[in-house]
Amino acid sequence: MLVLEDGRTFRGQAYGAVGETFGEAVFNTGMSGYQETLTDPSYHRQVVVMTAPQIGNTGWNDEDDESQQIWVSGYVVRDPSRVASNWRSKRSLDEELERQGVVGISGIDTRALTRHLRERGAMRVGIFSGPALADQAELLAKVQSAPEMKGADLCAEVATKEAYVVPAIGAKKFTVAAVDLGIKGMTPHRMAERGIEVHVLPANSTVEDIYAVQPDGVFFSNGPGDPATADRQVEVLREVLAKKTPFFGICFGNQILGRAFGFGTYKLKYGHRGINQPVQDRTTGKVEVTAHNHGFAVNAPLDKVSDTPFGRVEVSHVCLNDDVVEGLQALDIPAFSVQYHPEAAAGPHDAAYLFDRFVSLMEAQRA
């Protein structure tokens, strides 16, 4: 049984591990890339509902994980594929969910559940199977006592505890200090492809930690939780901006940059999650199809250039579905960010140019 905090329930079959789990119910509109979704640390403490009806067709391989484990709290699918068929597949999706202890549910009307979340907003949820099943009122009380996502400080729970280095591929051109707030594995790889040696640092790294690696640029990654809790990272970033070191942030990093500029953040009603979200780069007019996973956004004006403690700042990218801020660009210092995933894991590749834009900032600073 799946139980939402407003009392609505769905009955289905156990999928993956048997037991109980709690989290924030969110939906993902991607039709592929479920392995990358499940291993994205930004989904920590969330129960992901897949809107694509059939999931699991290509099984589970050992190459596409974006981190060391599955991070979702629970998984909801309508029609699990009966057969896993791919030349790289090592085991089925439900076998991997069971192996990692991820409680899921299948066979429910995910379209009805998604419409409910769009109408009522993301909310707490529980999935119960096997011995965890009980009276509905008892299960609802458990869901309503679970922690909310608003106010959750989670990035340190998913980030690396020890610094490590991803070497440049080919000739080394630059060094980047990447603060891990829930980084996906493909992100430093995309930088390494461009000749960048990436020093991945823990979420609570200090300014001294960052500059100890003598970086040409600083990067803040994606990650889970409420950006309103990231006071420490905001203060660190303000010191980086004051030094005018080239900066690039994605997702949680975009929200931290927004706060560093003095903008507020807020929780979206149901968020953006999937690999098919249309965004316009307002600096070029180009529309990109992009990969998203965020439930919070920056509250910055779309219709004007803002004056901040670090000079002028404009909204560089905007979501064409709902006008949510999807990127910021400083006009007087070398800093920019986007609210989505240009590393394209899993797809699409429209936004890969953003890593080249970061390289251009570091080249200009060096010149």
Image (tube, grey):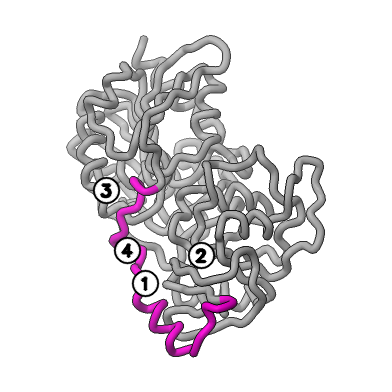
Q: Is residue 107 magenta?
A: no
Instruction: Specify the quadrant that holds the N terminus.
Output: bottom right
Q: Which dot, 3 or 1, sits closer to the camera?
A: 1
Asked if the residues shown at circle 4 and circle 2 are in contact, with their CB atoms under 8 angstroms apart, the answer is no
Q: Which dot, 4 or 1, sits closer to the camera?
A: 1
Give x and y (percent) for residue 256: 30, 44
- The span picked out in magenta is 129-157
Bin the neighbour count of mark 2 within 10 Å (Cα to Cα): few under 14, some 14-19, many 20 and up. Answer: many
Question: For residue 54, which quarter of the picture?
Answer: bottom right
Q: Which mark is residue 150?
A: 4
Task: Name the residue that disc number 3 marks.
Answer: 230
Task: Name the residue that disc number 2 marks.
Answer: 47
Give x and y (percent) for residue 306: 26, 43
Task: Name the residue that disc number 1 marks.
Answer: 146
In the image, farthest residue toward the front: 131
Asked if the residues shown at circle 4 and circle 1 are in contact, with their CB atoms under 8 angstroms apart, the answer is no
